[in-house]
Image: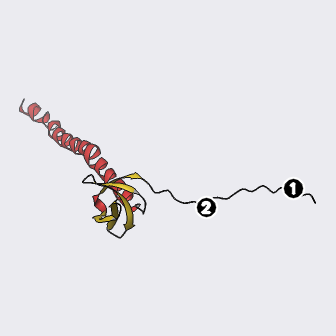
């Protein structure tokens, strides 16, 4: 009878370990992984900043990027007023500067009869 009571308790020791592992797995996929993804997206956005982009800082200040350095961004917040911010202080890009692409002008050759 004593032997039967000890044999049934062996499987019960593995259950708490599996529950803790499952909890860590859920925490990783629900919290850590999405946070890493957002951080990578923010770094990509901040590295792609260029002159002419309209941005919003983390403090809510709207401005237009006039210059970009390695770790700072120069914003024009009013005509003639420029301020310098750290790249991580840029929360989002409102509008991107339009890239000027060379356009080909199509001209039709007129038949000239002499």
Checking the image for residue 6, the label placed there is: none
How crowded is the residue under tag 1: few (<14 C-alpha within 10 Å), some, or many (20+)?
A: few
- Helix, strand or loop status at disc 2: loop
What is the total number of numbered labels drawn onto the structure image? 2
Relative image position of residue 14 (x, y in whole percent): 18, 41
Query: In the displayed structure, does residue 29 sit left or right of residue 48?
Result: left
Viewport quadrant of the C terminus? bottom right
Q: What residue is shown at x 32% (from left), y 51% (from top)?
A: 38
Per the image, the residue denoted by label 2 is 102
- The residue furthest top is 1
Per the image, the residue denoted by label 1 is 111
- Given residues 13 and 80, the one toward you in this image is 80
- Given residues 28 and 17, the one toward you in this image is 28
The CA distance from mark 1 to mark 2 is 28 Å
Which image quadrant is residue 76 in? bottom left
Colour scheme shown? secondary structure
Query: In the displayed structure, does residue 110 sit left or right of residue 90?
Result: right
- Helix, strand or loop status at disc 1: loop
Query: In the displayed structure, does residue 21 sit left or right of residue 80?
Result: left
Relative image position of residue 62 (x, y in whole percent): 32, 54
Q: In this view, does 17 lie above or below 51?
A: above
In this view, the mark in front (1 or 2): 1
How crowded is the residue under tag 2: few (<14 C-alpha within 10 Å), some, or many (20+)?
A: few
- Given residues 92 and 44, the one toward you in this image is 92
Q: What residue is shown at x 37% (from left), y 67% (from top)?
A: 68
Q: Earlier in the sequence, mark 1 or mark 2?
A: 2
- The residue furthest bottom is 70
Q: In this view, does 24 lie above or below 103?
A: above
Q: What residue is shown at x 42% (from left), y 63% (from top)?
A: 51
Relative image position of residue 82 (x, y in whole percent): 32, 65
């Amino acid at each position: 009878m004593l032997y039967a009571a000890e044999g049934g308790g062996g499987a019960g020791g593995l259950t708490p370990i599996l529950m803790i592992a499952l909890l860590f797995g859920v925490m990783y996929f629900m919290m850590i992984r999405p946070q890493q993804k957002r951080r990578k997206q923010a770094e990509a956005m901040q590295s792609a900043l260029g002159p002419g982009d309209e941005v919003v800082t983390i403090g809510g200040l709207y401005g237009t990027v006039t210059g970009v350095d390695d770790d700072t961004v120069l914003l024009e917040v009013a005509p003639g007023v420029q301020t310098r911010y750290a790249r991580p202080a840029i929360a989002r890009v409102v509008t991107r500067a339009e890239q000027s692409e060379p356009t080909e002008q199509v001209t039709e050759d007129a038949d000239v009869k002499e």
